[in-house]
Every structure is written in C-alpha cells, then in structure tokens.
Image: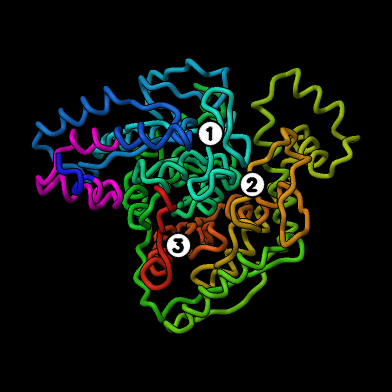
Amino acid sequence: MDGELFGTLLDGSLGGMIEAVGEGRVTRADLIAAAIERINERNPSLRAIATVDEGRALAMASLADCSRERRVLDGAFLSIKDTIETSGLRTTAGTTRFADHVPAADALVVSRLRGAGAIVVAKSNVPPLAGDLHTENSIFGATVNPWNEQRTAGGSSGGSAAAVASRMVPVDVGSDFAGSLRIPAAYCGVYAHRPTTDLVPTQGHIPPMPGARAPRDLLAIGPVARDPSDLERILGVIVGPAWPLSSVWRVDLPPCQLSTSAWRVAVTLDDSSCPVAHDVREGIERLVARLETLGVRVSFEHPPAPLGDIDECFGRLLGAAVSPTLSVERYEQTVAVASVLEDPYARRDALAVCQSHREWLLLQEWRSEIAARFEQFFHGFDVWLCPVTPTVAPPVWNDADRYARKIDVDGEQRPYFDQLVWTAAPAVAQLPATVAPIGVAGGLPLSVQVIGSRYSDYSTIAFAKLIAREHAAYTPPRGW
C-alpha cells in the first residue's frame, strides 16, 4: 500500500477519491482500509465517531471493486450522523434509550447515497436526541474540537464536523434543526450546507421516534465537507421528494452561472440583540474587503426582519417541534411550571412546548410574514452574508444546566442560546444556508454564513466556492 498516495487521498476531497478509483490508481477496499486505520488512530482523543462499520464497509468495497457498474459516487466513502437510521448498523441518537437500536432499513437519504455508490464507514457522535449545542452523551462521551481539545466542537452535528475537520472522513451527512450543521462546521473550520426546507427527505431521522411517519418541522438533512464542491456533489444525490410525491414530481434546482463581478451581496456584521465578538466581525470585514477588490457588489444591510423577532419566532417553533418527543410525565411537568420559570429562555421554551393549536397557527402566520420579507429582500441580492455564531468555538461547559451556561462576547457574558440567533432565519424562512471558513483567529476557525432565497442552494454553495478560491479555504487543524 502506497502510504503517501493514500495520505494524499484521505486528506483531499471526495472528488479526488472518486477520480483515483475510476482511474484504477487505488481500489475501494484499500482506500477504506486506510481510512479505518486513520479513524482508529485519531478517534480515541476526539470521540467524533460513534460506531465504525468496518466489516460491511470493506465487504461492500471489495464487491464494488469486482463490478463494472459505474455510479456517480463510486469510490466515495463517508460517515452518517448517529441520528440518521442505517440498516444493520446501530443508530443510537446519543441516548441509552436507543443504545441497541439497529434499524431494519436505511433512511431515504442513506439509501440514495448507497444507490449512488457511496460506502458508509461510520456513524458520527451526537448529543442525546440531537438536543444540545455541545456534543456529549453517556454512551460515547464528549466530542472535542480538533483545533483545541478544550473547546467544543458544537452540536448537534459535532461529531460530523470534528470527523471531517480531522480528516477521518471526507464528508459526513448530518442534520440541521437549530443550526446543528452550521454551528459545528463554523467551530471546526469546515463547510456545511443546510438545504432549503423539504428539499431533502427527513424520514428515518431520530427524533422523531423510530417509525414516525409525519415529518418534523424545522429539520433539514445536509452534508459537511472539507471542499465546497463536495457539498454540491452530495446534494445532487440526496435531493428530491419521498414517495408518493416522487412518482409525480422532479426537483430541478437552478444552477448558478454568475460571474464574480455579477454577485449582489448583502452583509450584516452585528446586531444589538445579539452582539458579535470583534474577531468574528473583523474576519467578515476582511472577507468583504477582498470581495470588493474582486468587483463583487457589496451592501451593508439590516436583515429584512429584526433579528430579535426572528429568534423569538424560532424559539416558539422549536418548542412546538420538540413537544411530541417528550414523555407524558415530562410534558405535564413542563405545563405545570411553564409560566413561573424565572429564566426568560427557559420560560419561553416551556410555554412553546405547551402552546395551543390556535397559538401555533398564529405562529405560522408570523413565520410566513418573515419568509415574505426575505423573499422581497432577495429580489435585490443574490446572497446575504452574516455571522454563524457570535464567537469562535467556546470552551467546553462544565455546567449541565444549559440555561446556566454563558458565552463570552468580548468580556460580556451572554446567554448560551445566543449561539442560535444568527442561524434562526434559514430555519424560520425555510432558506438554504452554506457555512464557509474564512480564516483563523487566536488558533480557532472563523466562518461566515451564506444565505440565499428558497431553492437557490447551488448559489449559496457557489459563493462558498468563490470564498474558497479567492479568500480562504479549509485549513487542517494543527496535529491532524
């Protein structure tokens, strides 16, 4: 086995692996064997990977090596977030409740990836039921940031981002509910894409509970990668409706054909309702200065709806979506204490969990108004650039009570849930959003969020490619 060749391929993109296999320079089996060796070497200190499917992955690779069939992802391997069901491979959702849950069937996205030739080598770590912004559970432990093991990798796709950033896998397919793809990608310095809501089927994701048929509001499934082209490659495979709509509808996303100087870009650097640390703000300012030298038309704008209003709407939607996953006992306890909780975030969340159907319908009208404002906003701009979170990756928290946790924004102690304020708009208004690394500050990655109008997914990814080509791209963490 040529160690230098395999090292180059494992450090590179999905596209490079597919090309090398197609040209016969490597076999799938040898490539995956090298990848599993790397996972076994690096994962014990990062705990990004929950379960490795070594035997089946190698067997599937050997079988594919003997086949003449050629598919779009032939030669590709990846990991899958441990909330997305994989047939014959346990899917724990980070909770002891499902520690031994081995699904009988793949989630639809996994089925599509396998059908395109991709091989699943592992499941990536998550917090219990994907319910936190830090990835830690009692089965697999805490996932740490490969840039600094005293820092969080984020959540709930913290395992996804850490595994990709540390080059254990080239791509992971995870999920984004409240920023769960975008926040870890920003903290770990990799790319991620939250697709337009409902563009990618979410059946087979936990939560909701295994076997649930109704889709979960706010949830989106999308890729994490070290190369923005791989976001596009994976998205092209997993988009499209589930049955029965798949029998009558076809998704044909518009391509992006804008030249560099044709881009119309809105930028928001800060907001009084959710202040941004100076290093994050300055990182985006450097990016904007570079874009202007390239001829990109940049305009500093406020979002079309107040950020605080978007966050409030999102918080109520989030509580409504979480409510069905609570046990009857937990739900009744929440109802009993909701109105008397002192912490404003805890009170908002509890009231949202037990809101009436009438309140939820009124909330949908508010959401639609916010979405309409964004639709009008994007008549004048191709993308909106803004922070992903107020800070770079925070230190790992010792306090189990999330409402007691704080983040430090230039010396000011801000609520833990400020991490969600800048990621709320795409979930509320059902917009695509791509996260791209834009540099490093204090030894930690800086990133930007590229948001577009509904179904402009290839445009937000195209702009991430522009950033990677002209300003900054993925940088491997030191030591990995």
**Label 2, on which residue?**
395
Q: Secondary structure at mark 1?
A: loop
Residue 380 seen anywhere in this rendered image of the structure: no
Query: Do tag 3 and tag 1 residues touch (Cβ < 8 Å)?
Result: no
Residue stretch in magenta: 7-35
Residue 460 circle label: 3
Label 3 Cα crowd, 10 Å radius (few <14 / some 14-19 / many 20+): many
The nearer-to-camera label among 1 and 2 is: 2
Name the quadrant of the N terminus: top left
Q: Secondary structure at mark 2?
A: loop
Q: Position of residue 477 (x, y in %)?
A: 44, 52
C-alpha distance separating marks 3 and 2: 30 Å
**Badge 2 amino acid:** Pro
Image height of 50 relative to 319, above or below: above
139 is within the stretch colored magenta: no
> In the drawing, does residue 283 fall left or right of residue 327?
left
**Badge 3 amino acid:** Thr
Label 1 Cα crowd, 10 Å radius (few <14 / some 14-19 / many 20+): many
Residue positioned 9% across, 31% down in the render: 66
Q: Position of residue 374 (x, y in %)?
A: 60, 64
| Quarter where residue 216 is shown | top right
33 is within the stretch colored magenta: yes
**Label 1, on which residue?**
126
C-alpha distance separating marks 1 and 2: 18 Å
Q: Position of residue 276 (x, y in %)?
A: 68, 63
**Badge 1 amino acid:** Val
Residue 25 circle label: none
